[in-house]
Image: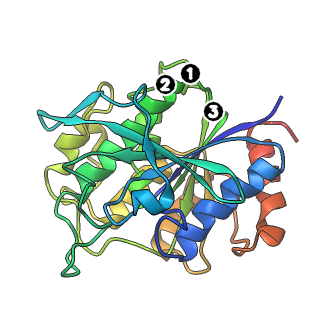
Amino acid sequence: MAIKVLYINQEITPYVPENEMSLMGKLLPQSMQERGFEIRTFMPKWGTINERRGMLHEVQRLSGMNLIIDDTDHPLIIKVASIPVSRLQVYFIDNEDYFMKRRMTENESGEEYPDNGERAIFFARGVLETVKKLRWVPDIIHCQGWMAAVVPLYVKTAYQDEPSLCNAKVVTSLFTKQLKNDLGENFKRCVEFRDAKADLLTRYSNEFNFLDLGKMAIDYSDAIVEASADVNSELLSYSHEKGLPHLGYMGNEPSGFADSYADFYRQLLGNE
């Protein structure tokens, strides 16, 4: 039976400009699909994405749910497209408040959005609720980028009793790219959902900066991947202290990394 891997990506090329993270967002799922793994891939529907050029269309049966964050309803919209040639299908999480007509991390003036924390929360819950609706049960949940950093917390707390998610192993990739500003004092309050209580986050600073976000992702993950040659040294040390299974940097060429990732997944599942 094929191993099922859910990829939760911050960026995937060609939908956003090519960089280390967006390339891995495309090449890693594609490589695993070519090796017989069953794949589902998600990313935010950033406002910079040209829906016409990318041939995105809404999936009505998956859209329509309201997610409540900080006592406010936010409608969840799901869109889908396929990357040409590779035929890799990508699901997009969309919402008028958080993504439509808005850029990625920063606005047109280069200032980070003050609600980036809420956007990450909405994205995480949107992906997990959609996976439940798909009735698809992943063996591995692989998170790439700070936008996916809330996912490990939710999988291990708020969704720990969900049949489609409770047995999945969570993998977090550490990249060089990071946030400059903190997520604000309301982040802990906004993240509360079911068993994901704010008091679980007392070990992290009230302002919740990039390091806190990374440490939280590590704390609730089952394994860590070093996805850049120069990831944050503090986060790298923190992950080693946890004693989690660790995959070192393998470069960004499928010929160099694909088999190592496949073996890493199998070892994590005890399928060596």
Residue type highlighted by circle 2: Lys
Query: Could you tell me residue 16's position as x and y percent?
Result: 46, 69
Question: Could you tell me if the residues under marks 1 and 2 are in contact, i.e. CB atoms within 8 Å?
Answer: yes
Question: Could you tell me if the residues under marks 2 and 3 are in contact, i.e. CB atoms within 8 Å?
Answer: no
Q: Secondary structure at mark 3?
A: loop
Q: Residue furthest front?
A: 52
Residue type highlighted by circle 3: Pro
Q: Identify the residue at image location x=43%, y=26%.
A: 159
Q: Is residue 134 left or right of residue 104?
A: right
The image quarter containing residue 268 is top right
Q: Is residue 14 above or below residue 218?
A: below
The residue where tag 3 is placed is 138
For the N terminus, the quadrant is top right
Q: Nearer the viewer, residue 166 or 238?
A: 166
Q: Secondary structure at mark 1?
A: loop
The image quarter containing residue 130 is top left
Which label sits on residue 135?
1
Query: Could you tell me residue 48's position as x and y percent?
Result: 34, 66
Q: Nearer the viewer, residue 175 or 12?
A: 12
Query: Could you tell me residue 235's position as x and y percent?
Result: 48, 66
Q: Earlier in the sequence, mark 2 or mark 3?
A: 2
Query: Could you tell me residue 198's position as x and y percent?
Result: 23, 38
